[in-house]
Amino acid sequence: MFNDFVQAFNAHIDNVLSQIADSNVKDAMRYALEAGGKRLRPYLVFAMTCQNQNDLNVMNLAYALEMVHTYSLVHDDLPAMDNDDYRRGQLTTHKRFDEATAILAGDALLTQAFQIITKLNLKSDDIVSAVNILSEASGANGMILGQVLDIQNDTNQANQISDLYKLYAFKTGCLFSAALRLGNLLNSKREDESQLDQIGKKLGIVFQIQDDYLERTSTFDVIGKSNQSDLNNHKNTVIEFLGLERSKLSINELYDELNRDIMLLNETYPKLLDIVHWMKDRIK
């Protein structure tokens, strides 16, 4: 569905990385960024705009967001966090290189993301808004809060399903929300940010429930990581609360809600609806 965008986006990543001084940290950044992945967050930026996929502002906003997402994965896999050996079917960054290099690569990805934003060809107010959106979504009141809640969940402190939904909304939903809000900056007629935030948070929740479901029902070859990670880390997931069948039902209900939420926006966003349909189809 979005192969053309992914191809163009990956070429843009290569172009930007070529401007970084050669080092083992650059190699680790490239390794993490080019490890695959569905590029959902970059595509959500594009899907929310009325721009061409080759528009440099679209690509740079999408790239900045993907850098922040990738940094979070590199750090999330570290021994102090989830201590995972594989990500997307290959060794995690700290296993392929070493812990110090992985930490520095994550730091470099995070900081360069904001450097990219400062060079956007936008009004200064919109550049400030982009910095604010991404820093808020990835900071201590956003994705990092989600990571804190996830660490607490390692000791089974998620006592009810609402605790998990809150965790998912912050850890994953905040960057989905940021993708929609960043793309919205490139539109002449802008949507209400609170509506986009709600859609993004809900998308993060259902994405994570689906991830829980697939981890219990799929193999390493399908999901590209251990299907025992959550069990080994003693994490509660939605599966523990609802079971497999009710979890699947909840996933489909949330995707139907998202479809209605998007249809209620002021403008039509066919690419946004397409990505929701594509994500829903993964559960079949």
Image (tube, helix red, strand yellow):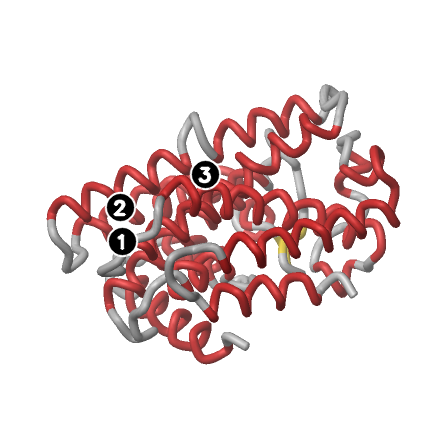
Measured as percent of width and height from the top left, residue 12 is found at 33, 69
Measured as percent of width and height from the top left, residue 34 is found at 48, 64
The residue shown at (72%, 51%) is 253
In the picture of the structure, the residue carrying the numbered disc 2 is 130
Number of callouts: 3
Q: Is residue 162 left or right of residue 145?
A: right
In the picture of the structure, the residue carrying the numbered disc 3 is 103
Q: Which of these two is toward me, 138 or 33? A: 138
Q: Considering the numbered disc 3 on the image, is that residue within a helix, a strand or a loop?
A: helix
Observer able to see residue 36: no
In the rendered image, the vertical position of residue 241 relative to residue 52, given as above or below? above
Q: Which of these two is toward me, 73 or 134? A: 134
Which of discs 3 and 2 lies nearer the camera? The answer is: 2
- Disc 2 + disc 1, Cβ < 8 Å: yes
3 or 2: tag closer to the N-terminus: 3
Q: Is residue 39 left or right of residue 59?
A: right
